[in-house]
Amino acid sequence: DTKVAPLTKEEVGRATWMLLHTIAAQFPDEPTRQQKRDAKELVSRTGNSPTFLYIWG
């Protein structure tokens, strides 16, 4: 068995930043109401997650 070390704060931060920017780049110019709600919820949940607060706090 090979154990993998947990990611560092910096690695998680970069990966999260890349994910959010990738999603934003693909977001439609004219989103539906549901797409707007989904985007707001994603940002809200990401920004308030314990991991995010630990990394950026």
Image (cartoon, grey):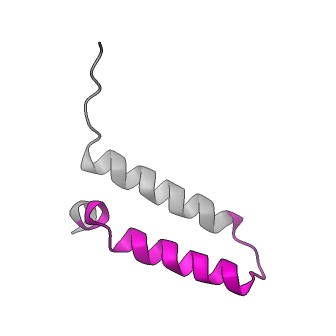
Residue occupying the far bottom of the picture: 33
Most common secondary structure along the magenta stretch = helix
The residue lying toward the viewer, choosing from 35 and 11, is 35
> What is the quadrant of residue 27 in the picture?
bottom right
Q: Quadrant of the N terminus?
A: top left
Percent position of residue 17, x then y: 45, 59
Percent position of residue 49, x then y: 32, 67
* Position above or below: 49 against 9: below
Q: Total number of numbered labels?
A: 0
* Left or right position of 19 against 3: right
> What is the quadrant of residue 23 in the picture?
bottom right
Percent position of residue 46, x then y: 40, 68
* Left or right position of 17 against 35: left
Residue occupying the far right of the picture: 30
* Left or right position of 53 against 17: left
- At x 56% / y 62%, what residue is drawn? 21
- At x 40% / y 52%, what residue is drawn? 14
- At x 50% / y 77%, what residue is drawn? 41
- At x 27% / y 21%, what residue is drawn? 3
Magenta segment boundaries in residue numbering: 26-53
Is residue 44 in the magenta section?
yes
* Position above or below: 19 against 2: below
Percent position of residue 19, x then y: 52, 56
Q: Quadrant of the C terminus?
A: bottom left
Residue occupying the far top of the picture: 1
Is residue 41 in the magenta section?
yes
